[in-house]
Image (cartoon, coloured by chain):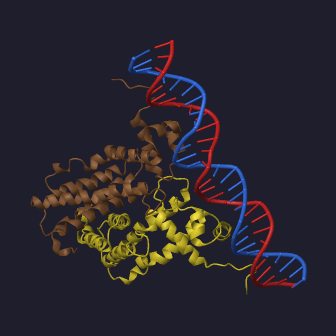
Chain colours: A yellow, B brown, C blue, D red
Amino acid sequence: MATRGRPRAYDRDDALDKALGLFWERGYDNTSMADLSTAMKLSPPSIYAAFGSKEALFDDVIAHYNKLHGTMIWADLDRFKHPKDATKHVLVASANAYTREDLPHGCLVVLAAPQENSTHATVNQTLRGYRRSVTKNLRNLYAEGQRRGHIPSTANIDTMATYYATVQTGMSIQARDGATRNELISVAEAAMMTWPSLISTSLVKG
Amino acid sequence: MATRGRPRAYDRDDALDKALGLFWERGYDNTSMADLSTAMKLSPPSIYAAFGSKEALFDDVIAHYNKLHGTMIWADLDRFKHPKDATKHVLVASANAYTREDLPHGCLVVLAAPQENSTHATVNQTLRGYRRSVTKNLRNLYAEGQRRGHIPSTANIDTMATYYATVQTGMSIQARDGATRNELISVAEAAMMTWPSLISTSLVKG
DNA sequence: CCATTTATGTAATGATCACTACACAATTAA
DNA sequence: TTAATTGTGTAGTGATCATTACATAAATGG
């Protein structure tokens, strides 16, 4: 069942890769449609025909980013027996992902548009939603850990989730500012030292 | 010794306050000179006469920001006898500063322009320099702590500084995404639990 | 073949960007 | 008073922004 009309002269994933590189490096606002047109090797009408608008393109880029670079951090966390191991994996995998030599440093979702208000509220809110899901995912992980008896029911899993999410997002800024992979792995290990104290609630309040 | 010419009809610090509010909330790129002109109640020529350019204005705004909001975190750290107390103060003061109801949440220096490349490289590099000084300040604090015998000479103070800087910068993202003051203070307390393990080097590698 | 459909490239659209020319107002120095 | 100096407001500057009109190219369906 062939499609009608003139076929596309480009590969959609390749084009998204090019757009991803620009948004990742420069952020949403500093990337113009002219820049994108040059990098994607697509004329503006082709971009608009395929993606709709700059914001819609950005949404597709984020989905592409999560699929390509997010899974190695978040996929199959249940293969770890203990939530502590899963947490360490998240932090170490983030340290590795944020310091690849062939890619911009740090996380696109954290760095592309952290404004509180802007002329592109949709972009800000979309990214905020993804960032919040980090804390939510960790909290779910710890709730499951409580059910399985790996974490005391008295532990404050909200604080735990917020704490490790803070370390992970902070690593994005550090990576962008030049922290090396080994430095970030050391940060991950330092953060994991807190685990025994964190799960024994007495030391943490709401 | 009075100055010649027509006197200014506005207060410079008031104008910087208004500009600070916009840059803080919207970031560098999402704040236009037209927005600034409206908020500062200054016509564009007055802004340019007083500050030179948008980038120069931003530099003055950062200096204003550091003077107003940075000192309560970083000033007089030597009043704390122990570097552990100073570190806890930095984190808790940050948690408080980043969640004020009357101001944008999170740190301007972290959130205003975290791009790796942009059309305003000067702005990015200036902010990056300020962010790096966080790690440097902490490292100096810990080096002094080693001299005074509060931290073992075998401790890896580079890792310690990077770790606590990561937590502090991560708190900016969390605050912007809606974390409450108490949540961030809990994060600060969680991060401080790592101290005993952190200063006993055996657990941390370079 | 012709009609339809979809993609492409050129060249433009009005809006907004940072910035400024210019005329005028308000002050001090002499 | 007059000249010099500095600040102000209006109304622009060219450049760039995201987006699109339009003519043409390349495919399928009949």
Residue A30: x %, y % from top left: 51, 59
| Closest to the observer, B55 or C4 | B55
Q: Residue at x 73, y 85 (%)?
A: A2
Would residue A114 appear left or right of A87 to someone viewing this image?
Answer: right
Answer above or below: position of B66 versus B14.
below
The answer to whether residue A61 of the structure is visible from this angle is yes
Answer above or below: position of B202 versus B29.
below
Q: Residue at x 16, y 48 (%)?
A: B79
Residue B26: x %, y % from top left: 48, 51
Q: Residue at x 51, y 37 (%)?
A: B45
Query: Residue B13, located in which quarter of the rendered image?
Result: top left
Point out the residue furthest to the left here: B149
Residue B181: x %, y % from top left: 34, 53
Answer above or below: position of B13 versus A52.
above
Residue A129: x %, y % from top left: 48, 63
Point out the residue furthest to the bottom here: A1
Q: Quadrant of the C terminus of chain B?
A: bottom left
